[in-house]
Every structure is written in C-alpha cells, then in structure tokens.
Image: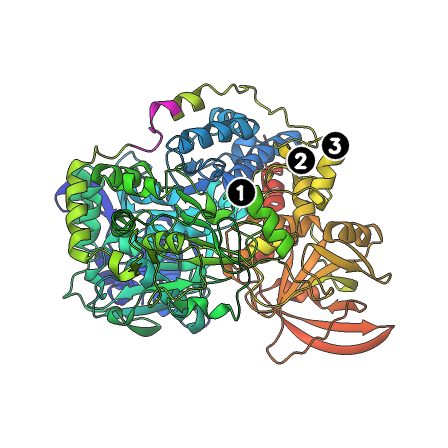
Amino acid sequence: MSHAFPNRRVPIPGFDRIDHVSLPAAEAAGAGPISRLPYSLRILVEHVLRQTADSRDAAASVAAITRRGPDSDTVPFLPRRILMQDASGLPVLADLLALQAAVRERGGNPQRVRPRLPMDLVVDHAVEVDHWGTPRAAEQNLALEMERHKDRYRFLRWAQTRLTGLRIIPPGAGICHQLNLEKLAEVVSVTSDDHGRPLAGFDSVLGTDSHTTMINALSVFGWGVGGIEATGAALGEPNALKVPDVIGLRLTGSLQPGVLATDLALSLTAMLREHGVVQKIVEFCGPGLHRLSVPDRATISNMAPEYGATMAFFPADEATLAYLRATGRADEHVALVRAYLEAQGMLRSSHTPEPDFNDVIEFDLSTVRATVAGPHRPNQKLTLSQVPSYFTALTGQRDGRALANGDVVIASITSCTNTSNPRALVAAGLLARNAIRKGLSAAPLVKTSFAPGSRSAGELLTATGLQRSLDQLGFHVVGHGCTTCMGNSGPLDPAVEQAVREQELEVAAVISGNRNFEGRIHPSVKLGYLASPPLVVAFALAGTVAVNLETAAIGQDPDGQDVHLSDLWPSDAEIDEVIATGSANRSGHRLPGEPRHIELSLWDSIDHPTSEDYDWDSEEGFIRKPPFFDDSLARPLVTGDIRGARPLLVLGDAVTTDHISPVSRITAGSAAGNWLGERGVPAHRFASFSARRLNHDVMVRGAFANPRLHNLLLDTEGGRTRLFPEGTVLPVSAAAALYAERREPAVVVAGYGYGAGSARDWAAKATRLLGVHAVIARSFERIHRTNLAAMGILPLQLPPDAVLDISGEETFDLIGAENALQPGGRANLRVFKDGRLLIEVTLLSSVMTQDETVWLSHGGLLPKILAEAADTLA
C-alpha cells in the first residue's frame, strides 16, 4: 500500500450536485482491500476518508482497519450526530453548560466548548406507571410526569436556548431508539463541505443509552457510550476507536411457524454471551438474512448490550430501502440512499460475496423455539417447559387475594425491544382477542400495562381493533416512553406489597423488554422474565411462572373446559393479514417533536429562564451545578504508587451498572432517603435516582445501593459495607467518606463482566465521588470500562489464575500504577494483613488507547477538555 492516496470527492451517479468520497476509487488508488471488509468497517473507512484532511493520516488509519490484526491500532471516529434520552442526556447538557461557565471563569473562550455535532434529546425515561387498567392511564401518567419533573423540564427548556444544534423531542412521543429507527436515522446523510457543496456520507450516531445499537438494524453505524464520551464527541473530540474484531453470524434456514423475533433475539443473546463478543462487532450474513424484516432485525440489534457486542450490524439491502419508504421517508431521499449504496458497493443482495470476518458463527433459524429469559439475566435462556424449574415447591393458595411464590404481579408489554415489531404486537393483540373469546381474563393480582415505543406502534393496534382486546385484559396504553423495563413500573397494589414483604415471597414480573436484572423492575419483585409480547399476555392470563405453558392449561372457559396456549396462539398467516389491513388503515407517521397537541402544548407552556447562566438548585434540588470542574475533582487520582488502599467493596461476577448506580425509587431509610429527609424533603418527593441524576449528593449516596448487591465483605445484600480496621457496617458512601477523611485510597475488587448493563455514566461518576482510585476486576464490560477511564479511575484486570481471598482487613499497595496508565501496562498488587505480605499479583492495564491515558493524566475527560479550553486565549 502506498504511503498516501488521493482522497477525491466525486458526484454520486444520478445526483450530480452531491459529492461523496468513493470507496471503490480509494481501493483502486491503493487504500487496501476495502471491498473485502465487513460492511460495518467499510462505513468506518468512509468516515476516516471523509473526515481526515491529511491524506497520509487517512492512509494510516485505513491501513489499520484493513490489517485488523490482534494488535490493531486505533483510528479516529466522529459520528454524524448524538442521540440522548433525558435520564442520561440531562447530565450531558449540564456538563456542557457548566464547562462553558468554567472556561469563562478561567479567562478562556467558551466558544471553544460549544457543540459541533447535532444533538437529539428524546424525553422518554420519566414516565411511570402510576395509573393502569383504565382508558385514561396515558393521559394521567403524562400529567403526573409533567408535575414531577417540572424542574428538570425547566432546565431542558433553558438549555434549548443556550445550545445550538440541540433538538428536544417532548414527553409523549415515544422512546429514543424507536424514533431513531422510524424518523431520525437517514442511512445516508448530506451536509455541506467547506466550500458549501453538498457532501453525502454514511449516517452514524453515538447514543447515551446502551441500546442505541437498535439502529444497526437499519445499517447505521452506532452504539451506546457513556454521557462523558458523548460530551466529548459533541464538542468535536474524535473517539479513538481500537479497530474491533468483526464476527460474522451466518444465518441459515427460516423461523418455524409461531416463532417470533423476540425468541430469536433471546436465543442469540444466550449463545453470543457464552461465545464471548465483548468489544467486538457482530455482523449478520448468510442466506437466512433476507427472511428477517427490519423490525425483526431491530429486535435483535437492540439486545446487543445483553450479549456484550459493540454493535449487532445488518448490512443494507432491499429490506432497508423498503423500511425507509414504509416509515414515510421522502422518495427523493430513498432514491439517494439507493444510488449512494450502489456507488459504494454497499447494497447487499443474495449474490453478494461474503466479507472476510475474523470468525464466523453458524446459526440455523429453524432451531429457535418459544423462548423466555430469566429470572435474573437476559442471557438465561429457557424454553416454556423450563420456566417453572426454578421452583422446587410452591406455597400459598390462589384464592382471590392470596399470593404464592412464582405468581406474576407485573406483566408489561414495554417499549424498548419489541414495540418496533408489528408482528410481535399483532400476535399479542390476536392472542388477547382469542382469550376473550374463550372467556378468559388476566389473573386478578397482575399489574398489566402497554407502553408503545412510538405513536405509530400504538396506532397499528388501534387501526386493527386489537387494542380493544388488549384493553379488556387490562393492557391499556399507559404512556409512550421507557417504563417498566427501566424500573418505572410504578406502585403495586398495597396488599400485594404487604403480602410479598410479610411472607418473603419470590414473585415475578414478565416483560417484553431487554433487562431483568435483580432489583431493576421493582424492588419487591425478585424474579424478572423477558418474553415476547404474546407470551407476556399469556403469563398474565396464567397468573404464575410456576407452570409449564407447553402442556398445562392456561385457564378454563366458562364451561370449565381447559384452555391451552396452543388454543390461543394465532397463525402466521393471520398475523400477516392483520398487519396488511392495519397498515392500510393507519393515519401515517408523525415527525419527532410533533406529538399530539396536548403534549406539545404542555411542553411549550413550561416557564424557563433565558439568562446566560442557570440559577442552579440548592442542595436538596433536582438540578444542581455539576461538581466535576471543581479543583478537587479536576485533578489526576493516579500519579504514582498507590499505598495503603482499602477495599471499599469486594464483589462477585456479573455486577451491572444497575448494581453500581440504581435507577429505582429512593426509599425512606436508605442513605439517599435519609439525606433528603434531613433537608426537609418528604418521602413522596424523593423520586428516583434516575430523576435525581443532577444531584451529586443524592447520587453518591445511591452508589452501590441496589438492594440486590452482594458485597462479599458482608453476609447480607444491599448498599452497605464494612469499614476497616474497625469492622463497623456502614452505608457505602459513609465508609468511603471516612476513608477519604483519613486519606486512605479506596479500591473496588470485582469478578468477571464488571459493569454490564446500561451506558450509565453515573456508575463511573459516583465511583469517582466515592474516592475510588482503581477498580480491579477479572474482566470489564466495554462501556463501563471506558467510563471509568473517562472519570480518571484506573481499570485493572486480574489474571485468570490469580486467587484473592479478601476479608476486608487487608490493605493494598499498587506498585507501578503509573505504568498501568498506558495501554498494555502493568502494576504489581501487594496485599498486606497486619503488616505481613500475603500475596503479590501482576495486574494488567485495561486502558485501551492513548486518548484514555491522556484522560487519566488529567483526572478524566472533562478536566482534560477544561484544561485545553481554558488555556486558549479568549
């Protein structure tokens, strides 16, 4: 390959006024075997060529991508746009605005820290299921949401006046992932170059929610990152991306009748989690690919964080173009997308040669059966006959109000994973209709709800009349947003809560979402199962997960005859017919930001300031000034050896970001609840950790406060630890504060898969506020590992053969910690007890890029940006 090659822009055939950077031309000029790369990496090549001005730099980056060896270099990646939801997006906006103020205070030019990329923020994570089972539930829940979150929404309305390029989609429109799929994503975007000439390129996105990968179904390059990384990208800081391995997932065969995309997604989640795809891209190929619609693909891509992949990418084909047309994209734009893909050699067909992958996994679609995942992880795959195997014995009687282990108390068709899928929704509606015809009803203690991911998703069921059947079973629409799956399930019946607590019952939630981590859905519900929308309805009818729905009756008709699931399940032909009828009757798709007049009117009526600086709340408020630019936090934690460190927590495997930074309601008696109560906040106004993310004092008291967290320094679950040398049991935040007061560094020790779950920057931010200098784990999930480095916390990996038997009485020395600030570096861990050396282990650095080294040297990404901007003359 030559040291440089021409990086010319040429018109798109058929669109002479629009230029593009041609991949075939670059390959012909010596850029390497681009056409043999996986489709996902070809998009990365296009970004590098389009965005890198110097041809030699571009050549070096393209060479790194085409080589794809075990020691691949990093390449710069800057997305087209940023996508946020309110829970994770609000801190991004607050950090941006606080950063501008900090630069101004230091005599720098705040224009240096203005957003360079378009940002979309969808307000979708605040609606809660307070009202259900009534036709007015959605309207009532929206009214409660607007009242509860008026302080947060006041800040968002002000931020709209201060940040150019920020578009906010108000509450009630739907979830960010589905709106991204239906409306925001372009597949091919057109901007203007420095000379004002239109320039086309592949669409790409970084999102502050881990399930941003849902957009990979539409052949858009993008994934979830922490809010800290998103802030950097918005400011024009390229993401230093270590060229990932790409695993080809070759699909063969076709799904059996009655099997849905949800079943396939859950089956793939279990298989790929076991195979190991963390830090890798999964790209789909094979003859079975054309049998999956874009909504089917979206169900699969949404789950990528659950199997650990960076992306779950589907190449563009005729189904991609058909989806763009079906969702109301302009004919001219669809024609441009086709012309661009064809010009780049990127429109896949059944005759297209398969790319060169790092590895290939074969998967026969015909092997998939009806699947449920649970009771605690999305990769715990179960057949229907295996679901009741969790229970060795049942207690209690179902005589009206009685409860037993395994009883379903929440059944929710919730928004994220499945409500982009018409087949799944129609199957649920038809099953509900068939159940009603058989005289069945939902079990009396089940809280039922339906939260469509967009207006169009709900309109399909309304247009077909199936929503009436769901309503009769209690599955009324409760709102258009992320509800039960992320913990906004709302209250249970007080009698149910009391029975669960007094009898210490293990009751269940069955939802059609993507996360069932312990303590996430509802603090009183220990068991969480993921299932397709029709199976959610089925379990609501059965009222228990302690039953084999393959063989046992789901209920009895008015004549006392047993009714089985097979009696209710609709045929594929019936589902297809209903979808065709419903699509013809639907009123069309609304643009994002144009929900029905009531929501838009409520949003526009919010009073907000127009001043340059925000009047931040006092300490008990929701919208407080972020502290991460204060001198105490804007400095490096690791500058040399770390000596005399205390293990703040010792944790096992599969600790999630839900364990580290919960989203659940703040309860009375918790460290956060006590702190708020001491400041005069009544318990009913505590809200959730998700809503309080801009109150750092609340969030630090919520760190590691998940009631299901198992700290090995204690025999009980919950957010407490043991302070040493005293041995006193304290809330984690209180113990950390005492260690900080004594100037004793703190570390966290964990097992495999540390930090799985959401792209939750507060899991890293709270860890930093606790004073944790390093996290020592067997392995890390991608997003949380990056977030730790972005907050200045050193991630270190234990070798597989190392044995640490920690009681908490030990102290740690990390010798050569500064060496571990570099990719490939090492540090020696020395463990002492009573002044005696117990063990010495060499730890591997989990720092991946030189950019992360720079972050750590400044104490994090935000302090690094501040230092650079403040150093620039105004």
Q: Which residue is mark 2?
A: 683
Q: Label 1's element?
A: loop
Residue at horizontal 66 percent and vertical 50 percent from the top: 703
Q: Position of residue 529 (x, y in %)?
A: 45, 58
Front residue of 4/318: it is 318
Left or right of 98: which side holds 417?
left
Answer with mark 3 or mark 1, whichever residue precedes in sequence: 1
Q: Which mark is residue 679?
A: 3
Q: Which mark is residue 812?
A: none
The range drawn in magenta is 591-598
Residue 865 within the segment the image draws in magenta: no
Q: Magenta region, mostly helix, strand or loop?
A: loop
Q: Position of residue 505 (x, y in %)?
A: 58, 58
The relative height of residue 208 versus residue 463 in the rendered view (above or below) is below
Answer with mark 1 or mark 2, whichever residue precedes in sequence: 1
Identify which amino acid the numbered label 3 is placed on. Answer: Arg
- Quadrant where the image shows the C terminus: top right
